[in-house]
């Protein structure tokens, strides 16, 4: 199993964080949408905890992202990253 320090996981979290910031949402505002504490968002953004697929889907929904579209874009970005 890969760790929270894996390059692919780092890219995933960067994309989520960039999306949150582009939506002008604070960690607290996103946490409220997810019905969790702000530390939940902080810990996954700082890669102190790993999101499972259900949690990732919930985060995408809270950020108004199409889950399948987000994963597709992530896969494209990951391929481009691996080409470098």
Image (cartoon, rainbow, N blue to C red):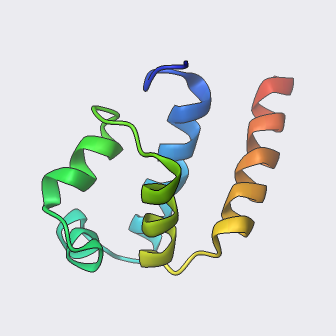
Q: Position of residue 83 (x, y in %)?
A: 86, 25
Residue 31 in the image, given as x and y percentages of width and height:
23, 68
Q: Eyeballing the image, is 60 above or below 54?
A: below
Question: In what quadrant of the picture does the N terminus appear?
Answer: top right
Could you tell whether 74 is left or right of 28 in the image?
right
Q: Is 83 located above or below residue 30 in the figure?
A: above
Question: Residue 64 or 2: which is nearer the viewer?
Answer: 2
Q: In the figure, residue 30 lies in which quadrant?
A: bottom left
Q: Residue at x 52, y 64 (%)?
A: 57
The quarter of the picture where the C terminus appears is: top right
Q: Residue at the location (53% across, 21% down)? A: 6
Residue 47: quarter of image: top left
Q: How many marks?
A: 0
x and y percentages locating residue 34 in the rendered image: 29, 72
Residue drawn where x is 35% and y is 76% of the image? 24
Query: Is 6 drawn above or below residue 16 in the view shown?
Result: above
Q: Is residue 76 left or right of residue 4?
A: right
Question: Looking at the image, which residue is at 42% across and 45% down?
Answer: 51
Residue 80: percent from the left, percent from the top? 82, 36
């Amino acid at each position: 199993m890969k760790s929270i320090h894996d390059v692919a996981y780092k890219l995933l979290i960067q994309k989520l964080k960039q999306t949150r910031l582009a939506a002008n949402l604070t960690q607290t505002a996103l946490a409220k949408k997810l019905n969790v504490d702000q530390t939940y968002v902080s810990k996954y953004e700082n890669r102190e905890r790993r999101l499972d697929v259900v949690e990732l889907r919930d985060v995408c929904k809270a950020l108004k992202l199409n889950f399948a579209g987000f994963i597709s874009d992530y896969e494209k970005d990951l391929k481009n990253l691996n080409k470098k």
